[in-house]
Amino acid sequence: MECREKKQDEKFCHECGEIIRAKAEICPKCGCRQHDVRPIRTNGLDSVFSGAPEKSRTTAAALALLLGGFGAHKFYLGKPLHGILYAVFVLTFIPAFFGLVEGIHYITMSDDEFSSRLSNGTLNQFFGKK
């Protein structure tokens, strides 16, 4: 059995443990589908070629902290219904409180955690599985 170290652009298969490319959706050895496929940041051009712009954690945090009461961060993150709800209830100051909490939450997480949670829809879940 060949023994080699995993490189930065590689990961282990969830099923068989084989070292595979990080962008691989299916393990070439066992055929198991990989569920945590995330784009590798190489030169910042990944979003240009994928067709969808990559969302910045810092921009989302700044929008949540400064304009969170209006739901600006929700529109930026592609959740327009949430943004509309924030805008409708802006006079109650409840969205401003949630925007502040979400802004702090975005600041405290890593870029990798932010992009993975954004892609699987669990970005604003504070409790439960990460």
Image (spheres, grey):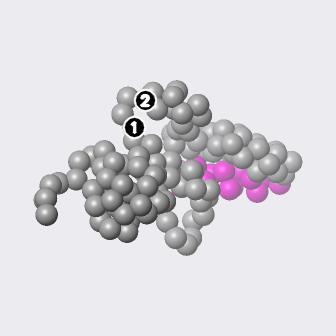
Q: Could you tell me which residue is drawn at 47 percent across and 60 percent down?
A: 33
Residue 17 is tagged as none
Residue 11, x across and y down, in percent: 32, 55
Q: Answer left or right for 95 relative to 119.
A: right
Q: Give the quadrant of the N terminus.
A: bottom left
Check if residue 96 falls in the magenta segment. Answer: yes
Residue 44 is tagged as 2
Residue occupied by mark 1: 41
Q: Could you tell me which residue is drawn at 36 percent across and 34 percent down?
A: 42
Q: What is the distance, in whole Å, between disc 1 and disc 2 at their CAs?
A: 6 Å
Mark 2 neighbour density, 10 Å: few (under 14) some (14–19) many (20 or more): few
Residue 115, x across and y down, in percent: 50, 48
Q: Main secondary structure of the magenta part?
A: helix
Residue 129 visible in the displayed image? yes
Q: Which residues are magenta?
A: 92-105
Residue 33 or 57: which is nearer the viewer? Answer: 33
Q: Could you tell me which residue is drawn at 54 percent across and 55 percent down?
A: 117
Label 1 close to label 2 by CB (< 8 Å): yes
**Amino acid type, residue under disc 1 in the picture:** Arg
